[in-house]
Image (cartoon, helix red, strand yellow):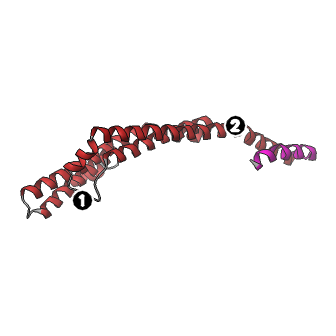
């Protein structure tokens, strides 16, 4: 706030000095800073609004998943200790909140109007579907691996090590598939297979 009040006084003082080599570039710079302040305030308000909306929608998704009992069912199907149980509702809520905040942040950058922020924001928005599908693949691999381990251990109680190997293999394959989906892991997959 101090800087916002100080900028007009600095501009006026530089104009009074009437030294063109110093005052013209300094005044141009200070005018551009002054011109961007309302955009920064609007972007900040938009991002704060995004955080508020993300909290509401994330909590709603969390409560819906818990209300339908999906979180408990997924945790029961997996081979996890009671203390470290996977919470589908909480994880999904965090992902939803993060995506909404990210979207509003990119839109806030768009309000500022600087070309670098527009380019970065467009790249982030374009890459989001790939990231979401990679997260779903990783989640599916983790759940499938845990279910396979639980099945093996319940069927053959002495085969706990085999269950861990199967779970690790399924998770490793899902990581490779997710990386390939992101366009990163194609080289790994070509080398391995």
Residue 22 location, x and y as percent? 85, 48
Asked which secondary structure carries label 1, the reply is loop
On the question of residue 193 being in view, the answer is no
For residue 51, above or below residue 82: above
| Side (left or right) of 170 relative to 124 | left
What is the span of residues highlighted in magenta in the rendered image?
Answer: 2-20
Q: Position of residue 57 (x, y in %)?
A: 43, 37
Magenta stretch: includes residue 7: yes
Mark 1–mark 2 Cα distance, whole angstroms, equals 52 Å
Q: How dense is the environment of label 1, judged by Cα within 10 Å: few (below 14), some, or many (20 and up)?
A: few
Decide if residue 76 is in sight here: yes
Q: Which mark is residue 81?
A: 1
Residue 109 sits in which quadrant? Answer: top right
Residue drawn where x is 29% and y is 58% of the image: 84
Label 2 element class: helix
Of residues 108 and 178, the one nearer the viewer is: 108
Q: Nearer the viewer, mark 1 or mark 2?
A: 1
Residue 87 in the image: state x and y as whole percent. Answer: 31, 49
Q: Seen in the image, is 66 located left or right of residue 13?
A: left
Q: Residue at x 15, y 52 (%)?
A: 148
The secondary structure that most of the magenta stretch takes on is helix
Work out whether 41 lies above or below 175.
above
Please name the residue that numbered disc 2 is placed on. 38
């Amino acid at each position: 706030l101090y800087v916002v009040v100080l900028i007009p006084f600095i501009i006026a003082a530089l104009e009074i000095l009437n030294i063109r080599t110093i005052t013209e570039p300094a005044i141009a710079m200070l005018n551009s800073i002054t011109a961007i302040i309302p955009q920064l305030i609007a972007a900040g308000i938009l991002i704060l609004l995004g955080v508020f909306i993300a909290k509401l929608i994330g909590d709603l998704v969390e409560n819906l998943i818990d209300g339908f009992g999906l979180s408990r069912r997924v945790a029961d199907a997996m081979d996890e200790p009671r203390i470290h149980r996977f919470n589908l509702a909480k994880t999904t809520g965090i992902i939803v909140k993060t995506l909404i905040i990210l979207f509003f942040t990119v839109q806030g950058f768009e309000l500022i109007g600087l070309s670098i922020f527009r380019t970065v924001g467009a790249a982030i928005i374009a890459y989001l579907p790939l990231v979401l599908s990679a997260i779903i693949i990783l989640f599916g691999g983790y759940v499938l691996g845990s279910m396979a381990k639980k099945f093996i251990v319940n069927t053959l109680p002495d085969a706990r090590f085999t269950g861990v190997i199967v779970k690790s293999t399924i998770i490793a394959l899902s990581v490779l598939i997710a990386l390939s989906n992101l366009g990163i892991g194609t080289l790994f997959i070509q080398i391995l297979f």
